[in-house]
Amino acid sequence: MAEKQIGTVSNYFDHVKVAAIKLAAPLKVGDTVRITGGEIDFEQPVKSMQIQHEKVEKAKKGDEIGIKVKKKVRKGYKVFKK
Protein backbone atom coordinates (compact mmCIF):
# COMPACT_ATOMS: atom_id res chain seq x y z
CA MET A 1 0.00 0.00 0.00
CA ALA A 2 1.38 3.38 -0.98
CA GLU A 3 2.05 5.93 1.72
CA LYS A 4 -0.15 8.99 1.79
CA GLN A 5 0.86 12.31 3.30
CA ILE A 6 -1.67 13.00 6.03
CA GLY A 7 -0.21 16.07 7.69
CA THR A 8 2.62 18.39 8.57
CA VAL A 9 4.38 18.99 11.86
CA SER A 10 3.30 22.44 13.08
CA ASN A 11 5.21 22.47 16.38
CA TYR A 12 7.39 20.35 18.65
CA PHE A 13 7.51 20.42 22.43
CA ASP A 14 10.93 19.14 23.49
CA HIS A 15 10.22 18.90 27.23
CA VAL A 16 7.38 16.39 26.65
CA LYS A 17 8.61 14.98 23.29
CA VAL A 18 5.29 15.76 21.59
CA ALA A 19 4.76 16.80 17.98
CA ALA A 20 1.78 18.94 17.03
CA ILE A 21 0.53 17.82 13.63
CA LYS A 22 -1.93 19.63 11.38
CA LEU A 23 -3.91 16.88 9.66
CA ALA A 24 -4.81 16.85 5.96
CA ALA A 25 -6.51 13.44 6.33
CA PRO A 26 -8.06 11.39 9.16
CA LEU A 27 -5.88 9.50 11.64
CA LYS A 28 -6.72 7.11 14.46
CA VAL A 29 -4.97 5.44 17.38
CA GLY A 30 -3.38 2.22 16.11
CA ASP A 31 -2.31 3.67 12.75
CA THR A 32 1.39 3.71 11.91
CA VAL A 33 2.91 7.02 10.84
CA ARG A 34 6.21 7.90 9.18
CA ILE A 35 7.73 11.31 9.82
CA THR A 36 10.37 12.69 7.46
CA GLY A 37 12.30 15.92 7.19
CA GLY A 38 15.90 17.08 7.38
CA GLU A 39 17.95 14.01 8.34
CA ILE A 40 15.03 12.45 10.22
CA ASP A 41 13.01 9.53 8.81
CA PHE A 42 11.28 7.15 11.21
CA GLU A 43 8.11 5.13 11.69
CA GLN A 44 6.09 4.59 14.81
CA PRO A 45 2.59 3.47 15.83
CA VAL A 46 0.17 6.08 17.16
CA LYS A 47 -0.35 4.88 20.75
CA SER A 48 -2.37 7.90 21.84
CA MET A 49 -3.20 11.38 20.65
CA GLN A 50 -4.72 14.54 22.00
CA ILE A 51 -6.64 17.53 20.70
CA GLN A 52 -6.49 20.56 23.02
CA HIS A 53 -5.13 18.34 25.86
CA GLU A 54 -8.13 15.95 25.54
CA LYS A 55 -7.38 12.31 24.71
CA VAL A 56 -9.05 11.20 21.46
CA GLU A 57 -9.19 7.90 19.57
CA LYS A 58 -9.47 9.48 16.12
CA ALA A 59 -9.07 12.85 14.45
CA LYS A 60 -10.33 14.25 11.16
CA LYS A 61 -8.91 16.40 8.39
CA GLY A 62 -8.24 19.91 9.66
CA ASP A 63 -7.66 18.88 13.29
CA GLU A 64 -4.41 19.70 15.03
CA ILE A 65 -3.30 16.76 17.15
CA GLY A 66 -0.47 16.08 19.56
CA ILE A 67 1.35 12.74 19.60
CA LYS A 68 4.44 11.57 21.47
CA VAL A 69 7.33 10.98 19.09
CA LYS A 70 10.51 8.99 19.60
CA LYS A 71 12.79 11.50 17.85
CA LYS A 72 13.04 15.28 17.79
CA VAL A 73 11.11 16.74 14.84
CA ARG A 74 10.79 20.25 13.45
CA LYS A 75 8.07 22.42 12.02
CA GLY A 76 7.39 21.57 8.38
CA TYR A 77 8.33 17.88 8.57
CA LYS A 78 5.95 15.68 6.59
CA VAL A 79 3.76 13.02 8.20
CA PHE A 80 2.66 9.96 6.21
CA LYS A 81 0.30 7.11 7.08
CA LYS A 82 1.51 3.59 6.32
Image (cartoon, rainbow, N blue to C red):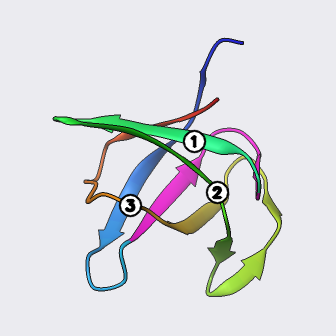
Farthest residue, direction left: 39
- Asked if residue 55 is positioned above or below residue 81 in the image, the reply reads below
Separation of disc 3 and disc 1 at Cα?
Answer: 12 Å
User: Is the residue 77 above or below the residue 67 in the image?
Assistant: above
Report which residue position mark 2 lands on. 46
Report x, y in % for residue 66.
54, 69
Q: Earlier in the sequence, mark 2 or mark 3?
A: 2
Q: Which residue is mark 3?
A: 70
Q: Are marks 1 and 2 in contact (CB under 8 Å)?
A: yes
The magenta stretch spans residue 58? no
What SS does tag 2 mark?
A: loop
| Residue 56 position by quadrant | bottom right
Q: Is residue 42 left or right of residue 65?
A: left
Q: Which residue is mark 1?
A: 33
Residue at 31% x, 44% y is 76
- Label 1 amino acid? Val
- Residue drawn 64% across the image and 42% down it: 32
Q: Nearer the viewer, mark 3 or mark 1?
A: 3
Question: How many labels, in total?
Answer: 3
Label 1 Cα crowd, 10 Å radius (few <14 / some 14-19 / many 20+): many
Query: Residue 50's image quarter?
Result: bottom right
